[in-house]
Image: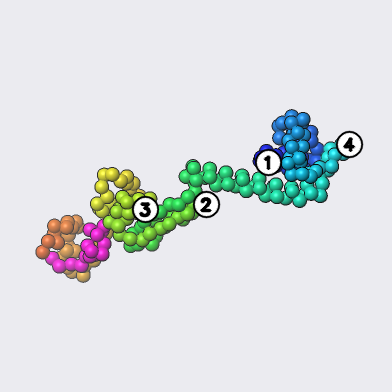
Amino acid sequence: MELRHLRYFVAVGEEQHYNRAAQRLRVAQPALSRQIQDLEEEIGFKLFDRLPRGVKISAAGKCFMEDARRILHEVNEAAARAKRVASGQSGTLRVGFVESISWHGVVPDSFRQFRERQPDAELQVKPASSFEHTEAVHSDRLDAGFVFTIANIGRELARLPIASLKLMLAAPKGHPLTKFKKLRLRGFERRCFCLVSETGKPGLL
């Protein structure tokens, strides 16, 4: 038994007429009749009662029709799923992100848009530092990562700027630093200030 036998059977069963089913399937009526006969011989019982005008599906044929429709539907769904995977519309996407810059903006918006545009795909997200994400992409444990550009990414990985982040210096009112319009890191060489730990956030420094 082949899938075409089931398609031909369903068409004749729905049309209750060989000629209309043949036109629907775009095949010659004699060829369609032979395929139905071959199917009946294989399963061992009649699917249709022949009438002067058209055919009438038998009781056994009605039972067989339900399963035939289900099988054809599952085959079509399987082919559609495989096609989505082949075209990149399905599968699994593994993405890393830095929590400190992901509460709002482009990162959560990107995840949300991906869910809307690729509902059949699985999205796996991993929070960690920029350094850890870079290493994970290198070792193929992640497909991509949202990282700070000042992290040591390397030339072998592609990068795409998506947003800029403003860092601010907080100082008490009246502090000498507030008199400057522009500040450079070298100006903090002999000053005490708080900064994110390089151990905790290596990709930020």
Name the N-terminal-most of marks 1 and 2: 1
Residue of label 2:
120
Which disc number belongs to residue 142? 3
What's under tag 2, amino acid-wise?
Asp
Q: In what quadrant of the picture does the C terminus appear?
A: bottom left
Q: CA distance from mark 4 to mark 1?
A: 28 Å
Please check the rendered image and state whether residue 124 is part of the magenta-colored stretch, yes or no. Answer: no
Q: Residue furthest left?
A: 190
Residue carrying label 1: 1
The residue carrying mark 4 is: 52
Q: Earlier in the sequence, mark 4 or mark 3?
A: 4
Q: Are marks 4 and 2 in contact (CB under 8 Å)?
A: no
Q: Is residue 105 left or right of residue 45?
A: left
Is residue 163 in view?
Answer: no
Q: Is residue 204 magenta?
A: yes
Name the residue located 62 percent from the left edge and 48 percent from the top edge. Answer: 74
Which of the two discs, 4 and 2, sits closer to the camera? 4
Mark 4 vs mark 1, foreground winner is: 1
Residue shown at 19% from the left, 56% from the top: 182
